[in-house]
């Protein structure tokens, strides 16, 4: 993927700084969110069992529901427990002939899933043992493991606490 040149990067950094100054409020000045959190993300998979084996079997996110999709007869709708009362949901749409996703505007770039540091290390070992490629530590980001699920969905396994990013708590 082509990268912006230095002049463009400087312009973009200036724009980010301007937007941050205008919109990011100090915690004391920030209103409470109207949301309670993400109930679930709903993604599309090509194969229900393959997806279960990856998220439940490999990553250890228990499958908690598997039912027919109420909007598309024959399609499955199923959920994995991500902890903290959060779910990761999937649909399959048999018969629609859907194509694999491409990274582009309007799509999910990746989903960052927080895991405790001890589980993070266990998952890293499990990925190594199963020859599943990942990135993150190789780029100097030891708290993140970036990988792709069987359908190419970007997953980040992050050992940071919730609301912690870039060396600071965003809610304190």
Image: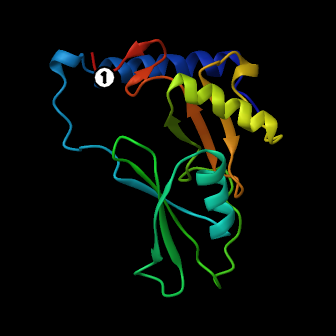
* Structure colour scheme: rainbow
Above-or-below relation of 6 to 105: above
Question: Which residue is depicted at the point 66% across and 58% down?
Answer: 53
Dot 1: within a 10 Å radius of its alpha carbon, few (fewer than 14), some, or many (20 or more) residues?
A: few
Residue 61 is situated, as x and y percent measured from the top left of the image, at 53, 48
Q: Is residue 116 left or right of residue 99?
A: left
**Which SS class for mark 1?**
loop
Q: Position of residue 153 (x, y in %)?
A: 64, 51
Q: Measured along the vertical axis of the image, is residue 105 above or below residue 20? A: below
Could you tell me which residue is drawn at 66 percent across and 16 percent down?
A: 7
Residue placed most toward the observer, 135 or 4: 135
The answer to whether residue 52 of the structure is visible from this angle is yes
Horizontally, is 103 left or right of 2 in the view? left
- The quarter of the rendered structure image containing the C terminus is top left
For the residue pair 80 and 32, the one nearer the viewer reads as 80
- Whether residue 1 is visible to the viewer of this picture, yes or no, is no
Q: Residue at x 65, y 19 (%)?
A: 141
Residue 95 at x, y percent in the picture = 65, 85
Q: Nearer the viewer, residue 2 or 162?
A: 162
Image quadrant occupied by the N terminus: top right
> Would you name the residue on which mark 1 appears?
24
57 relative to 35 in the view: left or right: right
């Amino acid at each position: 993927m082509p990268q912006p040149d230095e002049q463009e990067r400087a312009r973009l950094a200036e724009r980010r700084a301007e937007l941050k100054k205008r919109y990011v409020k100090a915690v004391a000045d920030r209103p409470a969110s109207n949301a309670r959190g993400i109930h679930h993300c709903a993604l599309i998979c090509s194969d229900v069992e393959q997806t279960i084996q990856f998220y439940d079997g490999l990553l250890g996110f228990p499958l908690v529901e598997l039912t027919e999709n109420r909007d598309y007869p024959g399609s499955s709708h199923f959920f994995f427990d991500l902890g903290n009362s959060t779910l990761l949901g999937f649909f399959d749409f048999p018969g629609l002939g859907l194509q694999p996703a491409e990274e582009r505007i309007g799509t999910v770039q990746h989903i960052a899933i927080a895991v405790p540091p001890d589980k993070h290390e266990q998952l890293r070992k499990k990925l190594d043992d199963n020859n599943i490629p990942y990135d993150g530590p190789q780029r100097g980001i030891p708290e993140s493991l970036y990988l792709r699920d069987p359908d190419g969905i970007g997953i980040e396994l992050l050992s940071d606490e919730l609301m912690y990013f870039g060396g600071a708590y965003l809610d304190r």
